[in-house]
Image: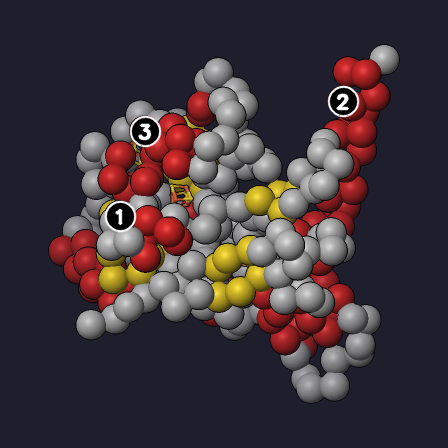
Protein backbone atom coordinates (compact mmCIF):
# COMPACT_ATOMS: atom_id res chain seq x y z
CA UNK A 1 0.00 0.00 0.00
CA UNK A 2 1.18 3.51 -0.80
CA UNK A 3 2.67 5.36 2.12
CA UNK A 4 2.05 8.66 0.41
CA UNK A 5 -0.85 10.51 1.94
CA UNK A 6 -2.98 13.41 0.86
CA UNK A 7 -6.23 15.29 0.97
CA UNK A 8 -9.22 15.21 -1.37
CA UNK A 9 -11.34 18.34 -1.03
CA UNK A 10 -14.75 18.20 -2.71
CA UNK A 11 -16.37 21.62 -3.16
CA UNK A 12 -19.78 20.03 -3.75
CA UNK A 13 -19.76 18.56 -0.22
CA UNK A 14 -18.46 21.62 1.60
CA UNK A 15 -21.01 23.56 3.67
CA UNK A 16 -18.59 26.33 4.65
CA UNK A 17 -18.81 25.54 8.37
CA UNK A 18 -15.15 26.46 8.99
CA UNK A 19 -14.46 23.43 11.22
CA UNK A 20 -11.34 22.61 9.17
CA UNK A 21 -10.09 26.18 9.61
CA UNK A 22 -10.69 26.09 13.38
CA UNK A 23 -9.12 22.64 13.76
CA UNK A 24 -6.01 23.74 11.88
CA UNK A 25 -5.66 26.79 14.14
CA UNK A 26 -5.99 24.62 17.22
CA UNK A 27 -3.63 21.91 15.98
CA UNK A 28 -0.94 24.43 15.09
CA UNK A 29 -1.56 26.69 18.11
CA UNK A 30 -2.32 29.66 15.87
CA UNK A 31 -4.22 32.70 17.14
CA UNK A 32 -7.62 33.69 15.79
CA UNK A 33 -6.69 36.26 13.17
CA UNK A 34 -10.16 37.21 11.91
CA UNK A 35 -13.49 36.97 13.70
CA UNK A 36 -15.17 35.98 10.43
CA UNK A 37 -13.28 32.92 9.20
CA UNK A 38 -14.75 33.33 5.71
CA UNK A 39 -12.91 36.66 5.41
CA UNK A 40 -9.52 35.42 6.63
CA UNK A 41 -6.53 35.07 4.30
CA UNK A 42 -3.57 32.72 4.29
CA UNK A 43 -0.94 34.24 6.53
CA UNK A 44 1.77 33.36 9.04
CA UNK A 45 -1.13 32.79 11.45
CA UNK A 46 -3.49 30.97 9.07
CA UNK A 47 -2.45 27.84 7.17
CA UNK A 48 -5.80 27.11 5.55
CA UNK A 49 -8.82 29.20 4.64
CA UNK A 50 -12.40 28.60 3.54
CA UNK A 51 -13.51 31.16 0.96
CA UNK A 52 -17.08 31.79 -0.24
CA UNK A 53 -17.90 32.11 -3.95
CA UNK A 54 -21.69 32.45 -4.28
CA UNK A 55 -23.10 29.14 -3.03
CA UNK A 56 -19.72 27.42 -3.15
CA UNK A 57 -16.94 27.25 -0.58
CA UNK A 58 -13.32 26.61 -1.47
CA UNK A 59 -10.45 25.62 0.78
CA UNK A 60 -6.93 26.87 0.16
CA UNK A 61 -3.81 25.28 1.63
CA UNK A 62 -0.37 24.06 0.58
CA UNK A 63 -0.73 21.57 -2.29
CA UNK A 64 2.28 19.51 -1.15
CA UNK A 65 3.63 19.29 -4.69
CA UNK A 66 5.26 16.11 -5.95
CA UNK A 67 8.22 18.16 -7.13
CA UNK A 68 7.99 21.30 -5.02
CA UNK A 69 9.52 24.55 -6.27
CA UNK A 70 9.93 25.69 -2.67
CA UNK A 71 12.25 22.73 -2.03
CA UNK A 72 14.23 23.22 -5.21
CA UNK A 73 14.87 26.96 -4.82
CA UNK A 74 15.78 26.93 -1.14
CA UNK A 75 19.57 27.46 -1.09
CA UNK A 76 20.02 25.96 2.39
CA UNK A 77 17.65 22.99 2.28
CA UNK A 78 15.16 24.44 4.77
CA UNK A 79 12.33 22.81 2.80
CA UNK A 80 12.16 19.05 2.38
CA UNK A 81 9.75 16.58 0.82
CA UNK A 82 8.91 13.93 3.40
CA UNK A 83 8.07 10.26 2.96
CA UNK A 84 4.37 10.94 3.65
CA UNK A 85 4.27 13.47 0.81
CA UNK A 86 4.13 16.46 3.16
CA UNK A 87 6.48 19.32 2.32
CA UNK A 88 8.19 20.34 5.55
CA UNK A 89 10.12 23.40 6.64
CA UNK A 90 12.97 23.74 9.14
CA UNK A 91 13.19 27.25 10.58
CA UNK A 92 16.65 26.51 12.03
CA UNK A 93 18.07 26.32 8.51
CA UNK A 94 16.10 29.20 6.97
CA UNK A 95 18.11 32.33 6.10
CA UNK A 96 15.04 34.41 5.25
CA UNK A 97 15.76 34.84 1.52
CA UNK A 98 12.08 34.23 0.69
CA UNK A 99 12.87 32.52 -2.63
CA UNK A 100 10.27 29.91 -1.68
CA UNK A 101 7.54 32.58 -1.60
CA UNK A 102 8.40 33.72 -5.09
CA UNK A 103 8.75 30.25 -6.53
CA UNK A 104 5.54 28.65 -5.25
CA UNK A 105 3.02 28.42 -8.11
CA UNK A 106 0.15 28.30 -5.62
CA UNK A 107 1.29 31.38 -3.61
CA UNK A 108 1.35 29.49 -0.32
CA UNK A 109 4.37 30.20 1.92
CA UNK A 110 3.90 33.21 4.19
CA UNK A 111 6.52 35.16 6.10
CA UNK A 112 6.40 36.38 9.69
CA UNK A 113 6.96 40.02 8.77
CA UNK A 114 6.33 41.29 12.26
CA UNK A 115 8.68 39.22 14.43
CA UNK A 116 12.37 39.68 15.20
CA UNK A 117 13.20 36.10 14.18
CA UNK A 118 10.87 35.59 11.23
CA UNK A 119 10.00 32.16 9.88
CA UNK A 120 8.17 30.94 6.81
CA UNK A 121 4.82 29.41 7.80
CA UNK A 122 2.50 27.05 5.93
CA UNK A 123 0.50 23.82 6.24
CA UNK A 124 2.67 20.75 6.87
CA UNK A 125 -0.10 18.23 6.16
CA UNK A 126 -0.20 17.56 9.91
CA UNK A 127 3.04 15.60 9.63
CA UNK A 128 3.29 14.58 13.30
CA UNK A 129 -0.34 13.46 13.45
CA UNK A 130 -0.01 11.48 10.24
CA UNK A 131 3.21 9.83 11.44
CA UNK A 132 1.26 8.81 14.55
CA UNK A 133 -1.37 7.15 12.36
CA UNK A 134 -4.00 9.88 12.71
CA UNK A 135 -5.94 11.88 10.15
CA UNK A 136 -5.03 15.50 9.53
CA UNK A 137 -6.85 17.79 11.97
CA UNK A 138 -8.87 19.40 9.17
CA UNK A 139 -10.09 16.06 7.79
CA UNK A 140 -10.96 14.78 11.26
CA UNK A 141 -13.02 17.91 11.97
CA UNK A 142 -14.93 17.99 8.68
CA UNK A 143 -18.55 16.93 9.30
CA UNK A 144 -19.42 16.19 5.66
CA UNK A 145 -16.23 14.46 4.41
CA UNK A 146 -15.72 17.38 2.02
CA UNK A 147 -12.13 17.10 3.26
CA UNK A 148 -10.99 13.49 3.04
CA UNK A 149 -7.56 12.30 4.13
CA UNK A 150 -5.98 9.04 3.00
CA UNK A 151 -3.59 7.19 0.74
CA UNK A 152 -2.95 9.09 -2.46
CA UNK A 153 -3.72 6.19 -4.77
CA UNK A 154 -7.08 5.67 -3.04
CA UNK A 155 -7.93 9.39 -3.17
CA UNK A 156 -7.17 9.52 -6.89
CA UNK A 157 -9.42 6.51 -7.42
CA UNK A 158 -12.27 8.09 -5.42
CA UNK A 159 -11.92 11.38 -7.30
CA UNK A 160 -11.96 9.68 -10.71
CA UNK A 161 -14.99 7.57 -9.75
CA UNK A 162 -16.91 10.65 -8.60
CA UNK A 163 -16.24 12.38 -11.91
CA UNK A 164 -17.20 9.30 -13.92
CA UNK A 165 -20.37 8.56 -11.99
CA UNK A 166 -21.59 12.17 -11.74
CA UNK A 167 -20.87 13.73 -15.11
CA UNK A 168 -23.51 16.48 -14.71
CA UNK A 169 -22.54 17.34 -11.18
CA UNK A 170 -18.80 17.84 -11.52
CA UNK A 171 -16.56 19.98 -13.66
CA UNK A 172 -14.66 17.13 -15.30
CA UNK A 173 -11.17 17.76 -13.97
CA UNK A 174 -9.21 17.08 -10.78
CA UNK A 175 -7.35 20.22 -9.72
CA UNK A 176 -3.98 19.39 -8.19
CA UNK A 177 -3.46 16.15 -10.07
CA UNK A 178 -1.36 17.70 -12.83
CA UNK A 179 -0.84 21.38 -11.97
CA UNK A 180 2.89 22.04 -11.58
CA UNK A 181 3.45 18.29 -11.83
CA UNK A 182 0.72 17.39 -9.34
CA UNK A 183 0.68 17.11 -5.59
CA UNK A 184 -0.96 15.73 -2.50
CA UNK A 185 -4.06 17.91 -2.38
CA UNK A 186 -6.74 17.12 -4.96
CA UNK A 187 -9.84 19.22 -5.54
CA UNK A 188 -13.19 18.44 -7.16
CA UNK A 189 -15.69 21.13 -8.06
CA UNK A 190 -18.98 21.77 -9.82
CA UNK A 191 -17.53 24.83 -11.62
CA UNK A 192 -14.20 25.62 -13.34
CA UNK A 193 -11.53 26.06 -10.70
CA UNK A 194 -10.61 29.65 -11.59
CA UNK A 195 -14.16 30.64 -10.54
CA UNK A 196 -13.18 29.55 -7.03
CA UNK A 197 -9.94 31.48 -6.92
CA UNK A 198 -7.68 28.53 -7.65
CA UNK A 199 -4.64 29.59 -9.58
CA UNK A 200 -5.00 28.81 -13.25
CA UNK A 201 -2.37 29.01 -15.97
CA UNK A 202 0.00 26.83 -13.97
CA UNK A 203 2.11 24.66 -16.27
CA UNK A 204 1.36 20.95 -15.96
CA UNK A 205 5.06 20.16 -15.80
CA UNK A 206 6.94 20.30 -12.49
CA UNK A 207 8.39 23.80 -12.04
CA UNK A 208 11.57 23.24 -9.98
CA UNK A 209 14.02 23.23 -12.89
CA UNK A 210 12.63 26.49 -14.20
CA UNK A 211 12.26 28.31 -10.89
CA UNK A 212 15.72 27.30 -9.71
CA UNK A 213 17.28 28.58 -12.90
CA UNK A 214 15.26 31.81 -12.86
CA UNK A 215 16.12 32.46 -9.22
CA UNK A 216 19.79 31.93 -9.97
CA UNK A 217 19.40 34.16 -13.05
CA UNK A 218 20.93 31.49 -15.27
CA UNK A 219 19.65 31.63 -18.86
CA UNK A 220 17.73 28.53 -19.90
CA UNK A 221 20.03 26.19 -21.79
CA UNK A 222 17.35 23.73 -22.78
CA UNK A 223 14.30 24.79 -24.72
CA UNK A 224 11.60 25.33 -22.13
CA UNK A 225 9.62 27.82 -24.26
CA UNK A 226 6.11 28.28 -22.89
CA UNK A 227 7.09 26.95 -19.51
CA UNK A 228 9.79 29.60 -19.21
CA UNK A 229 7.44 32.44 -20.21
CA UNK A 230 4.65 31.26 -17.92
CA UNK A 231 7.17 30.89 -15.13
CA UNK A 232 8.55 34.40 -15.71
CA UNK A 233 5.02 35.78 -15.59
CA UNK A 234 4.48 34.01 -12.30
CA UNK A 235 7.70 35.13 -10.74
CA UNK A 236 7.24 38.78 -11.70
CA UNK A 237 3.70 38.79 -10.32
CA UNK A 238 4.83 37.08 -7.12
CA UNK A 239 7.73 39.48 -6.57
CA UNK A 240 5.36 42.46 -6.86
CA UNK A 241 2.81 40.86 -4.57
CA UNK A 242 5.40 40.03 -1.91
CA UNK A 243 6.79 43.58 -2.05
CA UNK A 244 3.22 44.87 -1.55
CA UNK A 245 2.66 42.57 1.45
CA UNK A 246 5.95 43.73 2.95
CA UNK A 247 5.03 47.40 2.48
CA UNK A 248 1.58 46.89 3.99
CA UNK A 249 3.10 45.12 6.95
CA UNK A 250 5.67 47.88 7.53
CA UNK A 251 2.88 50.48 7.34
CA UNK A 252 0.78 48.54 9.84
CA UNK A 253 3.77 48.27 12.16
CA UNK A 254 4.62 51.96 11.85
CA UNK A 255 1.09 53.18 12.59
CA UNK A 256 0.70 50.65 15.39
CA UNK A 257 3.87 51.80 17.08
CA UNK A 258 3.41 55.54 16.52
S1 LIG B 1 2.24 24.51 -3.00
FE1 LIG B 1 4.01 25.86 -2.86
S2 LIG B 1 4.68 25.72 -0.73
FE2 LIG B 1 3.33 23.98 -1.13
S3 LIG B 1 4.73 22.32 -1.76
FE3 LIG B 1 4.03 23.32 -3.65
S4 LIG B 1 5.64 24.85 -4.06
FE4 LIG B 1 5.89 24.23 -1.91
S1 LIG C 1 -3.34 19.33 6.98
FE1 LIG C 1 -3.05 20.08 9.08
S2 LIG C 1 -1.75 21.89 8.84
FE2 LIG C 1 -2.63 21.44 6.82
S3 LIG C 1 -4.53 22.61 6.68
FE3 LIG C 1 -5.10 20.60 7.47
S4 LIG C 1 -5.03 20.88 9.70
FE4 LIG C 1 -3.90 22.59 8.83
S1 LIG D 1 -14.95 21.41 7.73
FE1 LIG D 1 -15.53 20.41 5.81
S2 LIG D 1 -17.56 21.23 5.32
FE2 LIG D 1 -16.72 22.56 6.90
S3 LIG D 1 -15.72 24.23 5.75
FE3 LIG D 1 -14.14 22.68 6.10
S4 LIG D 1 -14.19 21.35 4.28
FE4 LIG D 1 -16.10 22.55 4.30
Query: Marks 1 and 2, Cα distance to the nearest angstrom?
Result: 37 Å
User: Who's the residue at 72% across and 32% down the image?
Assistant: 114
Is the residue at mark 3 in contact range of ligand 3, meaning its CB lies under 8 Å from it? Answer: yes
User: Who's the residue at 78% across and 23% down the image?
Assistant: 253
Closer-to-camera residue (245/57) = 245
Label located before the other in sequence (3 or 2): 3
Near mark 2 (Cα within 10 A), the count class, few <14, some 14-19 or many ≥20, is few
For marks 3 and 1, give the one nearer the viewer. Answer: 1
Closer-to-camera residue (24/69) = 24
Furthest-left residue in view? 165
User: Who's the residue at 68% across and 56% down the image?
Assistant: 94
Please state the horizontal and vertical placement of residue 36, each as a whole percent of the image: 46, 18
Please state the horizontal and vertical placement of residue 160, each as a whole percent of the image: 23, 61
- Report the residue marked by disc 1: 135
Tell me the element at label 3: helix
Disc number for residue 252: 2
User: Who's the residue at 36% across and 63% down the image?
Assistant: 84
Amino acid sequence: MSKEKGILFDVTLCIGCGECYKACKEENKLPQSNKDYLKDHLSDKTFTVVEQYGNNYARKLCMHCNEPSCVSVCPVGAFTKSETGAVLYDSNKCIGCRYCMQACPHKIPRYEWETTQPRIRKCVLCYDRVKAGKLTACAEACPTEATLFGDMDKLIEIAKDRLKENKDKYFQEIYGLKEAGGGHVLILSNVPFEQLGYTSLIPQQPMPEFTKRAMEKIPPVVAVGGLFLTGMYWLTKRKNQIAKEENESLHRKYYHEN
